[in-house]
Image (cartoon, rainbow, N blue to C red):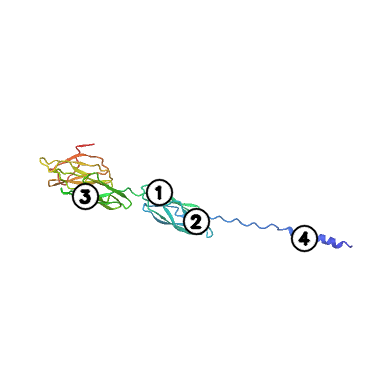
Amino acid sequence: MPRAPLAVLVSSLVLVLPLAGCGGDDPTEPSPIPCSYTLSPANRTVGSEGGTGVVTVTTRADCGWTAASNAPWVSITGGSTGKGPGSVSYAVTPNTDQSSRSGTIAIAGLSFTIVEDGRAPCTFDVTPQQQNFAAGGGNGTVAVATASSCSWTAATTTEWLTIVSGSTGQGNGTVSYTVAPHTATIARSGSLTVGGVQVSWITITTSMPHQGDDRVFFTIAPNMTGTARTGTITVRDKVIRINQGALDSWAGLYSVSTFLSPNFSIRYRIWSR
């Protein structure tokens, strides 16, 4: 009889322990959903003049991102960091090369590609292409018209021509030169080369003043530019127009006569090298 309370106590413990063991494991936390991003547009092509643009970033409100340029000619002007939906602004500098170029902006681990066109080849319009001076010489100017990104030089190998200003330039400009007095009785001709275009590309080789038949001989310099050109020769009261095509490498001796129509376009080749 004295041990009865102990038996009851042990029995109670046996009943309680299994109940304490039920449902003892902690619930497992759910895995976070990874961030995903889309860019719009995914790429862009710009002209050689450059420009600005915007890329739209689409993602969840809790997702952060950064943007960085991988090209020195592309700069981030806004939105270098963000969280949730947003946008990235950028600027592209002009391309002065004739070759196109490609660069990227890294946005939220994605690449936004920019292709910039190369500039068009430089062409030069030089006016006038022919000027006449009296024996006393004088001053003259040549106007150069071209794109603002195109550089040019002016030079002469004629000893009695001197360039006084405009020996180099970029974009539109003017070349000024002087013509020294001429003391001989035979006419002479010289030339300037401006932006690869030869001024006074027609040279009269017949001695002046001329007597006898009306045939006048002259030479034509090669035209290595991409633009056709037109010059004139005045024989007595007739103006003869000389046309030369673009990229024409012919250089030789030609002749004209006053019997030709004043409006006749002519290019007679007697010999060439």
Location of residue 188 in the rendering, given as x and y in whole percent from the top left corner: 17, 44
* Marker disc for residue 178: 3
Q: Are marks 2 and 4 in contact (CB under 8 Å)?
A: no
Q: Which residue is mark 2?
A: 66
Q: Are marks 1 and 3 in contact (CB under 8 Å)?
A: no
- Residue pictured at 49% horizontal, 52% vertical: 110
Tell which tag, 1 or 3, sits nearer the viewer: 3
- At label 1, which amino acid type do we have? Arg
Q: Which residue is mark 1?
A: 101
Local SS, label 4: helix
Q: Residues within 10 Å of mark 4 (few under 14, many from 20)?
A: few
- At label 4, which amino acid type do we have? Val
Could you tell which of marks 3 and 2 lies nearer the N-terminus?
A: 2
Q: Which residue is mark 4?
A: 16
Tell which tag, 3 or 2, sits nearer the viewer: 3
Location of residue 108 in the rendering, given as x and y in whole percent from the top left corner: 50, 54
Residue 17 visible from this viewpoint: yes
Location of residue 42 in the rendering, given as x and y in whole percent from the top left corner: 45, 53
Local SS, label 3: strand
Q: Nearer the viewer, residue 111 or 67?
A: 67
Where, quadrant-wise, is the N terminus in this rendering? bottom right
- At label 3, which amino acid type do we have? Thr
Local SS, label 2: strand
Could you tell which of marks 4 and 3 lies nearer the N-terminus?
A: 4
Q: CA distance from mark 3 to mark 2?
A: 62 Å
Local SS, label 1: strand
Outermost residue toward the right in this view:
1
Q: CA distance from mark 1 to mark 2?
A: 24 Å
Q: CA distance from mark 1 to mark 4?
A: 79 Å
* Marker disc for residue 200: none
Please give left or right for residue 164 compared with residue 24 in the image.
left
Q: Nearer the viewer, residue 195 or 102?
A: 195
